[in-house]
Image (tube, helix red, strand yellow):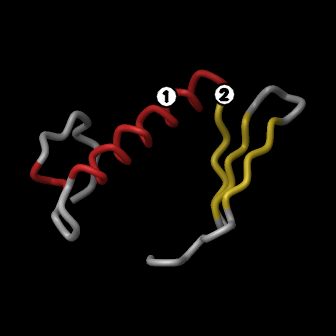
Amino acid sequence: MKGQGQGQGKLALCECGKLHFTYGTVTVHFERDEFFLFAEAVGRLSAMMKQAPNGSPLSARPATDVRICH
């Protein structure tokens, strides 16, 4: 997926109070609290990626959520 989706991320706060995050052809709709939880999870994953050597699989770290694929 290298290079895919560059510049395609969009955020919109709707009048209904939901936040809509669009990336490429996918749109995810969040309530306010859900969005903050999502953003924190992405931040943790980003920190893990920064600490891992290039090409190293992240699965070597303990998973906190059993719903993770692979």
Which is more toward the observer, 2 or 50? 50
Residue at image coords 85%, 28%: 16
Quadrant for residue 47, please give it: top left
The amino acid marked with disc number 1 is Leu
The residue labelled by disc 2 is 31
- Looking at the image, which residue sits at the far top? 33
Q: In screen coordinates, is 38 left or right of 44?
A: right
- Image coordinates of residue 6 in percent, x first then y, are 61, 70
- Find the distance from the CA under tag 2 to the CA under tag 1: 10 Å
Relative to 11, say whether 14 is above or below: above
Q: For numbered disc 2, what is the local secondary structure?
A: loop
Image quarter of the C terminus: bottom left
- Image coordinates of residue 27 in percent, x first then y, are 67, 54
The residue labelled by disc 1 is 37
Q: In screen coordinates, is 45 left or right of 66?
A: right
The amino acid marked with disc number 2 is Glu
Decide which of tag 2 and tag 1 comes sooner along the chain.
2
- Image coordinates of residue 50 in percent, x first then y, are 30, 52
Image quarter of the N terminus: bottom left
CB-based contact (under 8 Å), mark 2 and mark 1: no
- Looking at the image, which residue sits at the far right? 15
Residue at image coords 66%, 24%: 32
Q: In screen coordinates, is 8 left or right of 12?
A: left
